[in-house]
Image (tube, helix red, strand yellow):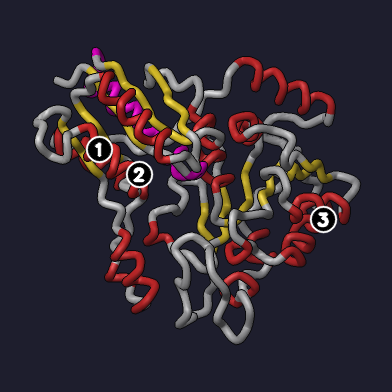
Amino acid sequence: MPRRILVIRFSSLGDLVLTTPLYRELRQAFPNAKITLLTSEGCGEVLANNPHLDHILFHPRHERFSELQALAAQLNAAAFDLVYDAHRSLRSRWLVARLTAFGLKSRPAVWVINKRGWQRLALIKFRSKQMLPVRSQREQWLLPLEHHLGRSLPKQTELFPDRKSIVRVRTFMSAHQLDSKRFLAVGPSASHPLKCWPLEHYRTLLAELLKRGWPVVLVGGPDEPEPELLAEAFPEGVINTAGVFSPLESAELLRYAVRAICNDTSIAHLAEAMNTPTLVLFGPTVQEFGYAPLLAESQLLETELDLPCRPCSKDGRGLCRNATTLQCLTSIAPEQVLRHVPDFPD
């Protein structure tokens, strides 16, 4: 039984949320172990207050090699019994190699995830979904532990906003007369433009939602233009919180939404971690990549067209090569989204 466990997962925000079942199930399997997470500064703070973690080490996302060497020395001194590489990046592989003396030491034991990178590339290149069977990333990251225990484990994600975040969000809701489960959250941005449902579609959607009586709260990060443009178009009934709250505070706000509507981005994962159903719009990506919503009430919407160019990107990077730009997203009509929106409660 390991006494000291190190989990390595640096980024990104959505991926970190999806790793949360791993910490819970490690704690359940090894209740007396000290569990440390090594993650990135900034986005890693979404995992603060997690009761299943004894310690979180935050590391710069763009460190100098001397800082990486110092980190390896620090980790070596901690004498971990088990290293769980839940990232498999060049950086995490190098750290694992240092901790095991490049394979010469038997301790710590090392468990690694399968990133399925070549399968994703093959799916993009050959457009055959048989290249990559549907499996959620939450499940993928749990597989080494499941293999060790010989059983399947729960996949539900979870986040733990602190008291300060809870009070700040409730104060905000009170100031804007927002009641729990009586507003919709909309996330119109994404980390890469290729994943963004057209702004004109969001305008049509918001106009109809307001007509139906729904207050709308826009969520997102700082420096994202879409929420600001939509808030300017709808000065009444639409509240813009993009850049106002931290990711963990945004998660707390999403707890009270009746549903979140967003692109294939971290907003969906934040919402589901707070048990709020999501309506997620997929364009250049597909559910085989592992990022589809999990809750029974959640819904994945994608084009009804059989597009030979889809999927074209594993994460939204790159350029659209379709003659009709972003047809995978423009062909999802606002009416399709509205079919899945409940009536405003009396």
Q: Give the side of residue 105 with respect to residue 171, left or right.
A: left
Callout 1: SS: helix
> Going by the image, does 53 lie left or right of 307?
left
Element assignment for label 3: helix
Residue 36 or 326: which is nearer the viewer?
Answer: 36
Structural distance between the alpha carbons of marks 2 and 1: 9 Å
Q: Which residue is mark 2?
A: 91
Q: Name the mark nearer the viewer: 2 or 3.
A: 2
| x 28%, y 44%: residue | 93
Read off the residue under disc 3. Answer: 229
Q: Nearer the viewer, residue 137 or 224?
A: 224
| Drawn side of residue 29 relative to residue 330, left or right | left
Give how far across and how far down residue 60 sits, in percent. Answer: 49, 35
Give the amino acid type for the residue marked by disc 3 in the picture.
Answer: Leu
Magenta span: 12-32
Residue 45 image position (x, y, % from top left): 53, 29
